[in-house]
Amino acid sequence: MRPVLLFFSSFSLITAALAETPNAGEPPPDVLSLSIVTEAVLANNPSIREAHAKWEAMKERVPQAAAWEDMKVTGSTRAARFVDVARNSFTDQALGLEQSIPLSGQNRSRERMASADAWVALEETRRVELDALAKARGAYFSLQKEQALVELNRLDEAALKDFLESSRSKFGAGGEGQAEVLMAENEVDRIVEQQHDVTLAESEAETELKVLMNRDPFSPLGKAIDTPVEVEPLNFSVPELRGFLLENRPEIGMAQANLGLAKAERELAGRAWIPDPALTLQAQRYNYAGQAISEIDVGVSMDLPWFNANKYRAGTREAASDVVAAEQALDGARNEGLGLLRDQLEKIEALTHHVELYEGQLIPKAKQALEATRISYESGGTPLQDVVLSERALWDVESTAREHFADYQTALADLEAIVGSNANPNTPTSKTTHTITQ
């Protein structure tokens, strides 16, 4: 039952990243939303589809492992006889059936092993989904950032061109030196050159998204919805997060499945001492007999493992050691996941501080400094160089703030990939998702 529930819970990620409410309506065709990206990745990503196909294949091994051995049929007939014998001394034809009866339950142990393998494949599928979605979300937030930087760069270029025109007017009137004008022209050229770099980064983010969504890299993608740069404190409960990680992280699920596999192998090694009898039914026809069946024989055969005790004892010891190793691997997977969770929470806290600092203090102060410098320049109290430096400082602060915000959003997406469940209380989820509340 647990693998089935885990399989359905993997599809909860379709709604885990929705940026819009269900009643918000569809975005315009030329707008790219996070929900569109999420649904496209889950539906079309080749790695996810490959992982699902492998899991479907592994499920089909379970009934194969649980099945009885195939029934055997044997038949023989006389081809030639080179001696004289009395009538009906030998059989001329024989037909037999043989069926092994799994009284030891070894087939049930093999069934449990196949189920554990399928569970591992399921958890691997969930990991592929989580990683693909985390990459897609990171690329989407990066695209948002680069598109915002393109707009910031355009506004910066327009503002500097205004200052350039002003400096040229002052130069014509004798109030500005030629060096000031040349510096303003160089700054405009630098902004134009910078725009190419930002556009290249935007194109790279688009390409990454298209590849993850399995779209033609040369096809149009649309403009990402620009979300406001706002960070609301997410008061995560660490014990609750630990619980969700231990329950949902795919690596822990794989370690648990491998432990189940090792226990099933140990069980199989113990049952290997019990032979499975094979029943035989044979019909014979004697030479010169008038009836179709002259004789029916019933027999039984079985292996005798007790005469090869060293072999089976070694197999039992090997299986017991594998169980111990699997238990240690499970402990290691749990500790590793908790370590990643701790580091990720620290990262989110630091990025939250960065975004709040830049949006609440640094950007407003940089804008005030630019406005004060601009007023002073227009009144002739400040050289153009100070205006250019203030404009450049504002660009640096605003671009860094966008970087931090994109990193913050990506860190939340990575947190969900680490936990294996929706870890954002502000994101709507489906009923099969374990929601971590504030």
Image (cartoon, helix red, strand yellow):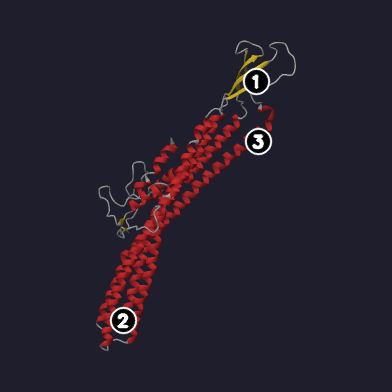
- Within the image, what quadrant is residue 169 found in? bottom left
Type of amino acid at the residue the image marks with label 3? Ala
Of mark 3 and mark 2, the one earlier in the sequence is: 3
Regarding residue 288, the answer to whether it shows in the image is yes
Disc 1 residue crowd, few under 14, some 14–19, many 20+, Cα 10 Å: few
Expressed as whole percent of the image width and height from the top left, the position of residue 323 reads 57, 39
Regarding residue 353, the answer to whether it shows in the image is no
- How far apart are the alpha carbons under marks 1 and 2? 111 Å
Which residue does the numbered mark 3 point to in the structure image? 314
Type of amino acid at the residue the image marks with label 1? Thr
Please, what secondary structure does the residue beneath circle 3 have?
helix
Expressed as whole percent of the image width and height from the top left, the position of residue 183 reads 35, 81
Q: Residue furthest right?
A: 83
Disc 2 residue crowd, few under 14, some 14–19, many 20+, Cα 10 Å: many
Type of amino acid at the residue the image marks with label 2? Leu
Please, what secondary structure does the residue beneath circle 1 have?
strand
Marks 3, 1: nearer the viewer? 1
Marks 1, 2: nearer the viewer? 1
Q: Is residue 198 above or below residue 307?
A: below
Please, what secondary structure does the residue beneath circle 2 have?
helix
Image disc number at residue 115: none
Of mark 3 and mark 1, the one earlier in the sequence is: 1
The residue drawn where x is 58% and y is 34% is 266
Q: From the viewer's perspective, is 349 left or right of 261?
A: left
Which residue does the numbered mark 2 point to in the structure image? 384
Question: Which one is in front, 7 or 437?
Answer: 7
Expressed as whole percent of the image width and height from the top left, the position of residue 252 reads 48, 44
Image disc number at residue 77: 1
Q: Is residue 221 above or below residue 183?
A: above
